[in-house]
Image (tube, rainbow, N blue to C red):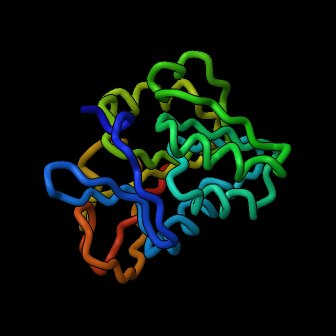
Amino acid sequence: MKYIDKTLIFEEDKIYYTDGGTTFEVMMDWEDSIMKASADYVCENGGDILEIGFGMGISAGHIQANNINSHTIIENHPQVIEKLKIWAQDKPNVIIVEGDWHDVKDSLSTYDGVFYDTWADENTSAFTTALLTWVKPKAKVSWWNNFTDKDDVFFIDGTTYEAINVNPVNNIYFNSNVYYLPKKQF
């Protein structure tokens, strides 16, 4: 069963699901400092921002706190889409794109900032190529980095990393006290 077919459980501090007796956390509120730093970085140029993955809306809230023109959010999980629609009701600069980013990649515009944070994404390997078609000159891009020293997922030349001290609660996806925020300017 694919992630988008899983029944998610929403609590104040996390989103998760269970499968075969194992709990899979999708997102947790301890990530707030990471999401803020990511949002602030990709919004440094203002303008138009693309966010792939809404989750708990933590990064989206931080993106909205910046001086931007538009905020396009792509989300594929039906339950999260419903939360996103409610969240966006009073935000006229938000454009919601429902579905898998890979399916809509060729219909997207260009952006001054891009933030990519998905769960169980089957198309991760295609992100770098698609990204090159979305970025305006000087665009700032960041993504979720599961690695505890550097990002070995995308191999994007010129990426730098900012060390952020974090205090994660025990979870299945990240358990280090230092998060390395990827930063890439095109």
Between 177 and 60, the one lying in front of the other is 60
Question: Number of callouts in the render?
Answer: 0
Q: Residue at x 61, y 54 (%)?
A: 42
Q: Is residue 86 left or right of residue 83?
A: right
Q: Is residue 138 left or right of residue 161?
A: right
| Quadrant in which the C terminus is drawn | top right
Q: Quadrant of residue 126?
A: top left
Between 6 and 160, the one lying in front of the other is 6
Q: Percent position (x, y) of residue 16?
A: 36, 58
Q: Residue at x 42, y 67 (%)?
A: 28
Residue 185 visible? The answer is: no
Between 186 and 146, the one lying in front of the other is 146
Q: Percent position (x, y) of residue 114?
A: 57, 44
Q: Is residue 110 left or right of residue 4?
A: right
User: Farthest top residue?
Assistant: 106
Q: Is residue 81 left or right of residue 27?
A: right
